């Protein structure tokens, strides 16, 4: 009787561990989807329709760029600041240069600060979350088309926001499982 109970407990605990591991892998994409839908954490809103209302309130947008320590690219905004009216469409560029002698693929993530402004920062077109491949020494300009939603005018919590920072970070895209396999082989 106790052996059967121990087996059942072992199976339940094993399933719990497998479930926890599965949830840890799902946490990042689920959090990303949550942030994109809600604007939480400064995540900008992706829009398909084009805004037409322009309001006479100026907001500065400051651009920042980073690369993950494993990413052998130089990555920087072409312009550091743009000033635009709320609702006005703007186009900004980031420059990426592959500093290696091999083809490199990367993916960029973005963030907006202050975080509360993420709900009103709408990107129409962007290079983020899509793989970008650069040949050895290749240099490219990557465009971002965006606007500040006029709904910002109806949010008293946003009255103090005169500047928004759009920040991108590029990460190296590794071939699926390659690093893990190489690490296992070198550990043997």
Image (tube, rainbow, N blue to C red):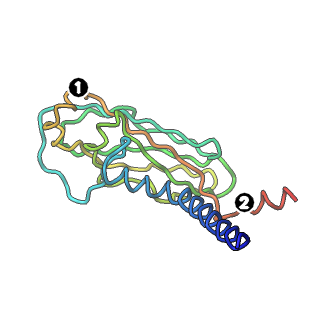
Q: Quarter-wise, where is residue 90 in the image?
A: top left
- Residue 53 placement (x, y as % from top left): 11, 46
Q: Compared to 151, does 172 lie above or below?
A: below
Task: Give the label on residue 140, or none.
Answer: none
Answer above or below: position of 44 versus 62.
below
Crowding around mark 2 (Cα neighbors within 10 Å: few <14, some 14 to 19, many 20+) is few
Name the image quarter holding residue 5: bottom right
Is 166 on the left-hand or right-hand side of 4? left
x 37%, y 39%: residue:
112
Q: Position of residue 21 (x, y in %)?
A: 60, 59
Residue matched to label 1: 160
In the picture of the structure, the residue carrying the numbered disc 2 is 180
Tally of numbered discs: 2
Q: Quadrant of the N terminus?
A: bottom right
- Corner quadrant of residue 92: top left
Q: Residue furthest top?
A: 160
For the C terminus, which image quadrant? bottom right
Q: Nearer the viewer, residue 84 or 48?
A: 48
């Amino acid at each position: 009787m106790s052996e059967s109970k121990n087996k059942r407990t072992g199976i339940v605990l094993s399933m719990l561990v497998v479930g926890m591991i599965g949830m840890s892998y799902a946490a990042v994409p689920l959090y990303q989807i949550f942030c994109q839908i809600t604007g939480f954490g400064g995540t900008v809103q992706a829009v398909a329709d084009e805004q037409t209302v322009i309001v006479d309130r100026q907001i500065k947008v400051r651009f920042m760029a980073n690369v993950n320590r494993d990413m052998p690219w130089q990555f920087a905004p072409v312009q550091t600041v743009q000033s635009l009216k709320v609702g006005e469409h703007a186009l900004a560029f980031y420059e990426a240069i592959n500093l290696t002698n091999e083809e490199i693929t990367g993916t960029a993530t973005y963030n907006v600060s202050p975080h509360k402004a993420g709900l009103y920062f709408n990107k129409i077109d962007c290079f983020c979350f899509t793989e970008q491949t650069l040949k050895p020494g290749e240099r490219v300009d990557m465009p971002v088309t965006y606007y500040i939603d006029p709904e910002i005018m109806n949010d008293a919590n946003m009255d103090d926001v005169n500047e928004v920072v759009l920040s991108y970070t590029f990460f190296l895209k590794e071939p699926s499982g390659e690093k893990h396999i190489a690490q296992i082989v070198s550990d043997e």
